[in-house]
Image (spheres, helix red, strand yellow):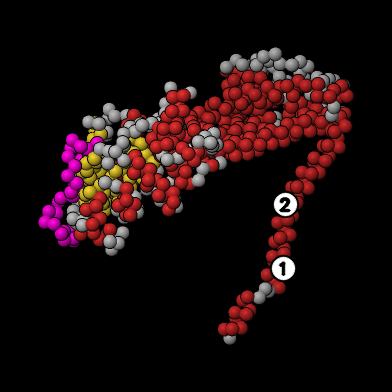
Amino acid sequence: MRKKGIAQDLSFRAMDEKIEKAFKAIMALAVMVPFVILAVLLIDTAVDGLPRLGWDFLTGFPSRFAARAGILSPLAGSAILMILTAAIALPLGIGAAIYLEEYAGKNAVTAFIEINISNLAGVPSIIYGLLGLGLFVRFMNMGRSLLAGAATLSLMVLPMIIMAARESMRMVPGDLREAAYALGADKWTTIRKIVLPLSLPGILTGVILSLSRAIGETAPIITIGALTYVAFLPDSVMSPFTALPVQIFNWISRPQSDFHVNAAAGIIVLLVIMILMNSLAIALRYRLQRRID
Amino acid sequence: METIEPISGHKEKGGDEDRRDYTGIRDGAAVIKTVALRAWFGSLMALKGVDILIAAGAVTAIIGPSGCGKSTFIRTLNRMHEGVPGARVSGSVYFAGQDIYDPKVNPVMLRRRIGMVFQKPNPFPMMSVKDNVLAGIPLQGTRGSAGDDVLERSLRQAALWDEVKDVLDKPGTSLSGGQQQRLCIARALAIEPEILLMDEPCSALDPIATAKIEDLIHSLRGGITIIIVTHNMQQAARVSDYTAFFYMGELVEYCDTDTLFKSPHKTRTEDYITGRFG
């Protein structure tokens, strides 16, 4: 009786195998569906937009005539926006992370701030747009300028940067901090010489990834009032501006299909920039990490 | 103040149960003196009132079973203990004529005079061998030849110079485990401390690397005061002049090393060194 039972337990039953196979198929499908949809979208965009891409398109200003329109001003707008956003968000984000991770006591206020930072990372971007409109454009009189746009995007990416920076600062081994303290280093020296250099790869990766999210954001930029037709290059941070996603959105909402081709070409440009930024994040991480290990 | 339960249930060999210090070190010859030193982790008292005199220029070994407070003890001497969340200290530690727990004392300045080497070699990963050695020196005056002098002197003292003089610009972490630990010793010596605390410096090393560290301790003897925590009683017997046996947060017996291992005064010490417990 017992021997028979063991023999039965060890052998596969037909039912088990069927369930196993069914599961495999479902999981494979779960991978395939988004992959196929993404591929279709990319191919469709590439077919529409690639023929339109060219030097003229990259260096031309927007135009009433689809065939003559280019994306120089939104491209420049997006680039300056990214640089300004990084310049504002990087010091603020790293500073906040250092304070929270290294200096703040473990009390109710810190816990409250921490919870709110996590929540802010999940706030829809249009809310940041409205905040930027009220705070920067109107209250602080920045107008519909690049600076207002960058300040708004900075607010949006700050929670992500703070969380990424804290995460990588927490990864710095405690025995290295102890080694620094035992050598008579004070806290700030230890942070500057040991903690920050070691967490830099993680911080930079977080910054670049959040900037590559910011460059694709349309809602907050439209909300604060980026223009949709800009036939000049910005001459200062107080200039009115447009950005890639805004231009793409503008072209797509036009009835003429020629503009849709322009939108597709613009999307390709935006995608290439994002891929480049993400590759840069990976490359930086790899290089700095190798220097540390 | 809490009262300290004496270690009971043990009949002492000598008549004087309260006596713990058999070294004969006098106040004047001591570089460190602790008085009623207690240390806590949260509500757990890890040191239960330690009074000890550490002889200047000597090598003092601290032995005892795991959890007896020996690491905690040396970490109170350079105020590293208080860096652990929830940790606190009471009592006094006199060094250079001052109680280091006096609010006027800056632990940063203290640690420049009392160096420390840890259990696991911990060179700074993004720094070269050279930068690691010079890491503890304040930036001014270390550039150029002055820095090179310190570099060579420290590495020679740590018996590492010949092995690394051609790879000074390679990362410190590219060295072997034993070399990394000697690099950490060189880094601690570079700031010319008066006392070097070593917290089980060989426990992560193989026997050959261990022997090199022990030789190095021998060569440093006399010039610098060394306090070494070790799990390895043979090591304590080999390297130290005085040995202190800790048990459950108390100093049980403190004696010159020969006597402690050959004819300890306390039954509990004898039980430990003969391997009856711990």
Image x and y of residue B4, in percent: 19, 50
State the separation of the CA atoms marked 1 and 2. 20 Å
Q: Secondary structure at mark 1?
A: helix
Q: Quadrant of residue B58?
A: top left
Image x and y of residue B47, in percent: 27, 47
Q: Are marks 1 and 2 in contact (CB under 8 Å)?
A: no
Image x and y of residue A162, in percent: 54, 33
Q: Which residues are magenta?
A: B8-35
Residue farthest front in this picture: B162
Q: Residue at x 87, y 21 (%)?
A: A68
Q: Quadrant of residue A27?
A: bottom right
Q: Residues within 10 Å of mark 2 (few under 14, many from 20)?
A: few
Residue type indicated by callout 2: Val
Q: Any mark on residue A31, and which?
A: 2
Q: Is residue A47 left or right of residue B215?
A: right
Q: Quadrant of residue A210?
A: top right
Task: Check the picture and name the quadrant holding the N terminus of chain A.
Answer: bottom right
Mark 1 lies on residue: A18
Q: Any mark on residue A164, and which?
A: none
1 or 2: tag closer to the N-terminus? 1
- A60 vs B13: above or below: above
Q: Is residue A247 left or right of residue B59?
A: right
Q: The residue marked by circle 2 belongs to what chain?
A: A
Residue farthest bottom in this picture: A1
Q: Nearer the viewer, residue A39 or A229?
A: A39
Q: The residue marked by circle 1 belongs to what chain?
A: A
Task: Check the picture and name the quadrant holding the C terminus of chain A.
Answer: top right
Residue type indicated by callout 1: Lys
Residue A170 in sight in this render: no
Helix, strand or loop: magenta stretch: loop
Mark 1 vs mark 2: tell me if same chain: yes
Q: For residue B9: magenta?
A: yes
